[in-house]
Amino acid sequence: MKVEVVPPDPKWRGKFDDESKRVALTLGENVVAIHHIGSTAIPHIYAKPIIDLLVEVKNIAKVDDCSLGMEALGYEVMGEFGIPGRRFFRKDNEIGTRTHHIHTFTARSSEVERHLAFRDYMIANPEDAHKYSELKRKLAKQYPNDIIGYMDGKDGFIKEMQRKALIWWTPDKYE
């Protein structure tokens, strides 16, 4: 997979809003909340142009009943995809470029808190967000065709930011 990190795009929020409406309709009353996460949710930083949605649901098992609907929206159903308790979906556009990821978890789970804490911490701490942006740009140049190398290169920084974020963040910060 080609690793492309691009400047921030003001259209990312609108793409999230549009997709979250479609996903909410497909997953129905099981949905508690849909959050914009990942680098495209953090203002002013470079990112892979993939919109990440975090969907909180009442019952994670009921998400499996919506697989055909998610496929109809263009998503590939990936199951837990390495994280117990998650339902993961990914979507490519008509030319095969990845456009969206959906991470679905039971509402208020530790995984939800981890993702929201990281996002909110980075938004509240632009110096750390800038460091993250610069690291991503460097790694994308270093590993232009190696997504594993790129991801491994970010791992230590992300874990340190998550540690700081979870100390800083409290559940009352939910949007």
Image (cartoon, helix red, strand yellow):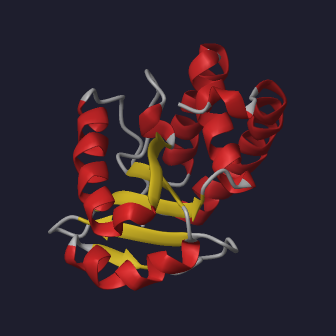
Q: Residue at x 23, y 33 (%)?
A: 11
Q: Residue at x 31, y 43 (%)?
A: 16
Residue 144 visible, this angle:
no
Of residues 161 and 170, the one drawn nearer to the viewer in this rendering: 170
Of residues 82 and 53, the one drawn nearer to the viewer in this rendering: 53
Q: Residue at x 23, y 72 (%)?
A: 74
Q: Residue at x 20, y 64 (%)?
A: 93
Residue 20 sits above or below residue 13 on the image: below
Residue 60 location (% of width, % of height): 56, 72
Q: Quarter-wise, where is residue 161 in the image? A: top right
Residue 103 falls left or right of residue 20 = right
Residue 135 location (% of width, % of height): 61, 35
Residue 39 falls left or right of residue 69 = right
Residue 101 location (% of width, % of height): 42, 60
Q: Quarter-wise, where is residue 69 in the image? A: bottom left
Q: Residue furthest left?
A: 94
Locate the N terminus by quadrant.
Answer: bottom left
Residue 30 visible, this angle:
yes
Q: Residue furthest front?
A: 29
Q: Quarter-wise, where is residue 67 in the image? A: bottom left
Residue 18 sits above or below residue 94 on the image: above
